[in-house]
Amino acid sequence: MATKSKKAAEAALNSYATGPDDRGFFGIFGGRFVAETLMPLILELERAYEAAKADPEFQRELDFLNLHYAGRPSPLYHAERMTAELGGAKIYFKREELNHTGSHKINNCLGQILLARRMGKKRIIAETGAGQHGVAVATVCAKYGMECEVYMGATDVERQAPNVARMTLLGAKLNPVTSGAGTLKDAMNEALRDWVTNVRDTYYLIGTAAGPHPYPAMVRDFQAIIGHETRKQMMEAEGRLPDTIVACIGGGSNAIGIFHPFLDDPGVAIYGVEAGGHGIDVENGHASSMTGGSPGVLHGNRTYLLQDSDGQILEGHSISAGLDYPGVGPEHSWLKTIGRVTYVPATDKEALDALQFCTRLEGIIPALESSHALALVKKLAPTLAKDNLLVVNISGRGDKDLATVAKHLGMKI
Amino acid sequence: MTKHVTRIDARFAALKKEKRPALVTFITAGDPDPETSAQVLAELVKAGADIIELGMPFSDPMADGPAIQASSQRALKAGQTMTKTLQLVRDFRASDTTTPIVLMGYYNPIYVYGNERFIKDAKAAGVDGLIVVDVPPEADDELCLPALAAGLNFIRLATPTTDKARLPAVLKNTSGFVYYVSITGITGAAAPVVNDVHSQVKAIKAETPLPVVVGFGVRTGAQARSISEGADGVVVGSAIVSIIEKSLGPKGEATDRTIKGVTELVRELRGALSAD
């Protein structure tokens, strides 16, 4: 027994996958920086999540929903023409855009709605930027007949009309947020204000791997199914693990989901692609918190933030509303600091080019978010050997972005 | 840990002799502009404020309602920074060496300024205590313990969700006073239920010798008086910054109504708390 626990301790020391610690920290990042009113609630959430994780019945129910409701596993698809065109790495797409509701967001929502039900909560609140998470939340609330309120920046409500209609159709109450700049961070502030007011019956269903502990770890765990499936599917397709993994990063939930099961495989090179907007050198013109920001504390966790020298949060900019967030999940901040993952930006223009490139070569319209990952693939794949197995996470489908894309390309729809 | 006697401790000791609760007033530093803010600060004391809570403006005040959100935005727009906030305290101290000043706000502007540097500069400027909304007792080693060691009070919020099991952890490193948040909600929201507040304050006082001050949702003299029964003071914030907001001219500039409006309310509050 003693030897075994010593071994486990040694393994933990050499592992990138054991975080967070019991206070919710990944190195200096993460933690629980919330007002006292919310502390008892997130401690209760942590206990409830730990209990659910240990309950086989919870996992069985989630597996069932993933299979029959979300349509998992999502395929691992060999993008032959893109591979040939780029002339380097063998490119695979992890097809999260084929999930129910059109993105990876459903993975997390199914997990958290089961948890909310176990906790006896009646009312669900959420924040959303592009509306993908809002739609996924409204979907699971419709399925379980739960009251649902979504906070969305007024600016985003205007530019994401189709998702607004979907949420309304699904029965969610949409609350446009006009405070601050009326974007995702303000929606998150407003959701936190709702939670602090309605503490007894309300469950806050956070959409990304950020916020106070246990959210970053919990959302990661629910999204890690992406990486676990990729591992298995690549073993079946190629008989070995991939060499390279690429995903886009806003808050970073799709990325941590595909990265996490590979963190302890030293042969797997991992890249996260942030929103470079108009360019990293443009003041407040990008949303690359790690490449162009600095550590700070916002929305319950310490992480890299877009902020000025006085600690005031900047809005940031990205063509993709889903990446337009001034922070990033704390585990990414830690993975950046220790150097396990390489984080790079891709600009609006590069993402737009990559979207068209993918659409024409593969007949798959990726979301603008995922197109940032593809922008790196375009640059990276030609530099890699032909036997380098590269997986890029296609986190969502691009239908929601047609208006934005058409506008930038001067098309009329 | 060494016990420092701060201006806050001295003020509560004096109020105890006077047998009246403390009137704690909140304004945001730099709202609506640095000069007016300095004037308001001085006038608060003249009008009867016993303790000043000075908000350090932040772009994302998650625990605050619309009134204080807007005051933060006004201050930031007028160019307020942490350095200017500390300067405001320093200037105030040049003419007032007894009124306690508590800086209140969120962690990020402090963290980015640098915790050690902040504690040193705040102490040197004449700050007496800190309320940092999003640093819970679980993170005491980061800011609370160094602040206490430097002789600052670290004032913790207790809330209706702080249950009996958790209360000792909340009180453990609290000093100066305990700030009881009278509602589950944001600042300036619905008025608290007086009876609930009284029983909660009683429960907290049973666990600590520290003064207990009640805030969130207190707007009028009558309310302040009924809420403060059994407590050691009340905090009024949103009502004051709302008056500032309403007094502003078309371009958001201070007018002669700005200071007048604030002092009238503070006098009313003080009158209600002082009455027998």
Image (cartoon, rainbow, N blue to C red):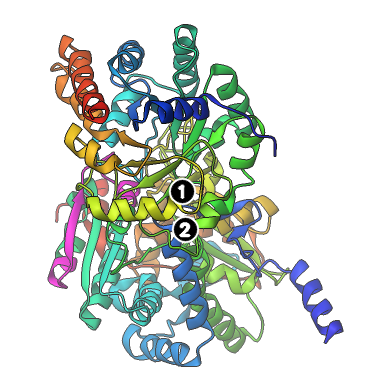
Residue type, mark 1 in image: Gly
- The residue positioned 28% from the left and 33% from the top of the image is B236
- The residue positioned 82% from the left and 87% from the top of the image is A1
Q: Which residue is mark 1?
A: A327
Q: Which residues are magenta?
A: A166-190
Callouts 2 and 1 in the same chain: yes
Which is nearer the eye, B274 or A115?
Answer: B274
Residue A81, position in %: x, y?
46, 71
Contact between marks 2 and 1 (CB within 8 A): the answer is: yes
Q: Is residue A176 magenta?
A: yes
Q: Earlier in the sequence, mark 2 or mark 1?
A: 2
Which is nearer the eye, A351 or A262?
Answer: A262
**Whether residue A14 can be seen here:** no
Residue A220, position in %: x, y?
51, 69
Q: Answer with left or right where residue A60 lies relative to residue A199.
A: right
Q: Which residue is mark 2?
A: A210
Secondary structure beneath dot 1 equals loop
The quarter holding residue A132 reads: bottom left
How many residues crowd mark 2 within 10 Å: few (<14), some (14–19), many (20+)?
Answer: many
